[in-house]
Image (cartoon, rainbow, N blue to C red):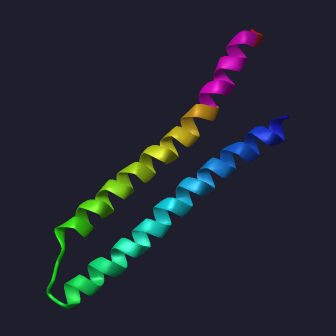
Amino acid sequence: MRVKRISDFLEFFNLAEYLLTNTVIHDIESLGSNFFFDLINIGNIAHFYWIFGVGIIFRVMGILIPANKFFHLNKRQR
């Protein structure tokens, strides 16, 4: 049972990491190409920070939700 909980946590964490990394790499590539051609697009910068913020929120949720369940179960066992 415990292994299943850890695997669920890791699956959620890996999904958030993949989505964050995939979009960040795309945004960095597009921002770099725009910079070299003197065509800086503000939309790419805004999209980069939005995705970065969402990725941080997903990571925090992925850490706090299992921790909250764990501590709640410990309170019931007392």
Q: Position of residue 60 (x, y in %)?
A: 49, 42
Question: In the picture provided, is 75 more to the left or to the right than 39?
Answer: right
Q: Residue furthest right?
A: 1
Picture quarter containing residue 25? Answer: bottom left
Residue at 48% x, 68% y: name it: 22
Picture quarter containing residue 46? Answer: bottom left
Q: Position of residue 37 (x, y in %)?
A: 19, 90
Q: Residue furthest left?
A: 38
Q: Position of residue 53 (x, y in %)?
A: 36, 51
Q: Is residue 11 above or below residue 67?
A: below
Q: Is residue 64 above or below residue 77?
A: below
Residue at 41% x, 68% y: name it: 24
Q: Residue furthest bottom?
A: 37
Q: How many marks?
A: 0
Residue 68 is a magenta residue: yes
Q: Position of residue 28 (x, y in %)?
A: 35, 75
| The magenta segment | 67-76
Q: Is residue 23 above or below residue 36?
A: above
Residue 73 is a magenta residue: yes
Q: Main secondary structure of the magenta part?
A: helix
Q: Quadrant of the C terminus?
A: top right
Question: In the picture provided, is 29 more to the left or to the right than 19?
Answer: left
Residue nearest the viewer, comparing 14 with 41: 41
Question: In the picture provided, is 31 more to the left or to the right than 22?
Answer: left
Q: Quadrant of the N terminus?
A: top right
Picture quarter containing residue 65? Answer: top right
Residue at 51% x, 39% y: name it: 61
Residue at 71% x, 44% y: name it: 8
Q: Is residue 54 above or below residue 21?
A: above
